Image: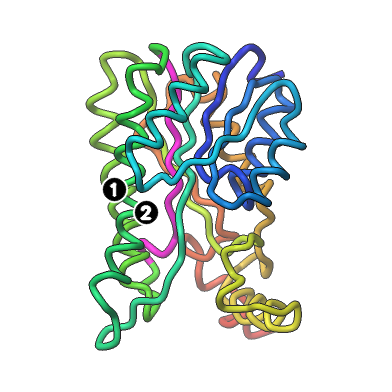
Amino acid sequence: MRLANKTAFITGGTSGIGLAAAALFLREGARVVVTGRRPEGLEEARSLLGERGFALAADVTDPDATGRAVADAVARFGALDVLFANAGIPGATPLGNTTLDAFDRIVRTNLHAVFFTVQAALPHLKDGASIILNGSVHAVLGIPGASAYAASKGAISSMARVLASELAPRGIRVNTVVPGATRTPIWKGRAPTPEALEALEARFNRATPLNRFAEAEQVAQAALFLASDESAHTTAAEITVDGGATGAPFGAPAYRTE
């Protein structure tokens, strides 16, 4: 049990990577509190969590709502050992055809909300706690049409290093998990049918050395390492889970000659 007697708070924990992390943390002995916005997702999470956790409705872009959710979690389970600031949204922001509101919505959710989630949790984090932020390979890939998303995720990587410095005196570690293409509901806007998703995966797989999407639990496994005492001397670090897309791009099928 790698998280026995620990309490974890996960934003965006009702689907995708957040829900996979919640399930994995539970299996490893943690008490888990998740937040989300969709009623159906909250019900699924409540069913999964059982007596060792609960799911709260909260919009991460509202610092007061996040603060209330953290307070509820602490009232139920005590001080926090793990914070996984996972919530985020996708969105296209092509140059020449993007409104300020569209751009701001993505940055407000993926960047501002992460900072204020950490700030809300800070008084309730134990010394030696682990903070995990969710980044993205978009920060370095230069994918067309994704300026706001890429900027927000690049800022997460930069901000994590600052937070790690600020919180080092308390022994609180701040690290980032960096997913590549992962099989989660985030793709529904671009691939609303199983056939469209299969075609999209085939395109992305050609640029991925391991030639497949990650499963949400594979990213959650990286978060588990960062949440556990096994990473007790790891801070201001990134774990990239992208099948080699950023680290060894010329190993991808698109570049193979055999």
Residue 100 placement (x, y as % from top left): 23, 72
What's under tag 1, amino acid-wise? His
> Is residue 234 part of the magenta span, yes or no?
no
Residue drawn at point x = 35 percent, y = 32 percent: 118
* Closer-to-camera residue (258/139): 139
Residue drawn at point x = 72 percent, y = 18 percent: 1
For marks 2 and 1, give the CA distance. 6 Å
* Residue 151, above or below 199: above
Quadrant assignment, res 143? bottom left
Residue drawn at point x = 67 percent, y = 70 percent: 211
Tag 2 residue? 109
* Closer-to-camera residue (258/208): 208
Of the 4 image quadrants, the one containing the C terminus is bottom right
Residue 157 placement (x, y as % from top left): 33, 48
* Residue 87, above or below 72: below
Q: Image check: 24 left or right of 98?
A: right
* Residue 196, above or below 220: below
What's under tag 2, amino acid-wise? Thr
Residue drawn at point x = 61 percent, y = 34 percent: 55
Q: Image check: 250 left or right of 151?
A: right
Tag 1 residue? 112
Identify the magenta region. Answer: 128-140
Colour theme: rainbow
Q: Residues within 10 Å of mark 1 (few under 14, many from 20)?
A: many
**Total residue callouts:** 2
Residue 237 placement (x, y as % from top left): 39, 38
* Closer-to-camera residue (134/47): 47
Assess whether mark 1 and mark 2 are in contact (beta carbons under 8 angstroms).
yes
Quadrant assignment, res 2? top right
